[in-house]
Amino acid sequence: MDEVLRFSPALGDWVLSNLRQGCSPAQVAAAMRAQHMPADAARVIVDCEALIAMARPRLRPSTTVDPLTGRDRAGEHRSSLGMFFRLRENALVARLDDRVSELMNLPVENGEGLQVLHYPAGARSAPHFDFLVPSNAANQASLERSGQRVSTLVSYLNDVAEGGETVFPDSGWSVSPQRGSAVYFEYCNSLGQLDRASLHAGAPVLRGEKWVATKWMRQRRFVAAR
């Protein structure tokens, strides 16, 4: 069985304090390696804390795509806060965009901007699809510009004390959030057929908080609405 590494909130506070004082992520990771922390673990912690710190001031109430109408909806369906980075917005985001592109096996330009979501205690997201419902007129312009969403990668940026699982109700499968891990799923094949078994939800955060970074890939180069 693989060992699960968990880190105390105090370590996260130390990383964040150094980043706020102007230390670069590379400098903080180097300091952690000097204390005999594995290099990969140090990089994961620093990248996660840096991404959270950059996202926090830009958070706004989140929306989801209604599985029946394809329209955005807010309120009780998703009680998180979220924001989007522009593609390759800065050095860290560019490095993450490149890495995610490699993992998802699609060009960087096919990706929508990296989204960061924050779920405080009690927050959740109701069951929803990530693909755009083709029959809904509200989605037509986006589908014409960039094609359908084909896959999702949800990366967990922190350890959650309790709850916050990503749940796939039709398959009975769930994934517990652990910092540095991720869940990947596809829902559109080369014929444009959509997999409704990709319906998923975020279980309520029972203790602590949850931070995730989500990347959606399109069939072709993503062109944002103007």
Image: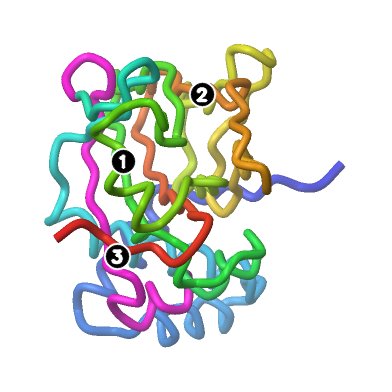
Residues drawn in magenta: 74-96
Q: Position of residue 56 (x, y in %)?
A: 19, 53
- The reply, left or right, for residue 205 in relation to residue 154 is left
Q: How dense is the environment of label 3, judged by Cα within 10 Å: few (below 14), some, or many (20 and up)?
A: many
Q: Is residue 84 magenta?
A: yes
Q: Is residue 170 left or right of residue 83?
A: right
**From the viewer's perspective, is 75 left or right of 150?**
left
> What secondary structure is marked by label 2?
strand
**Residue shown at 41%/51% (left/top)?**
213
Q: How is the image coloured?
A: rainbow
- According to the picture, the residue beneath numbered tag 1 turns out to be 140
Residue 105 versus residue 83 in the image, above or below: below
Amino acid type at mark 2: His
CB under 8 Å between callouts 2 and 3? no
Give residue 16's mark: 3
Sequence-wise, the earlier of marks 2 and 3 is 3
The residue at which mark 2 appears reads as 200
Identified at 41% across, 45% down, the residue is: 212
- Pick the residue in front: 170 or 176: 170
Dot 2: within a 10 Å radius of its alpha carbon, few (fewer than 14), some, or many (20 or more) residues? many
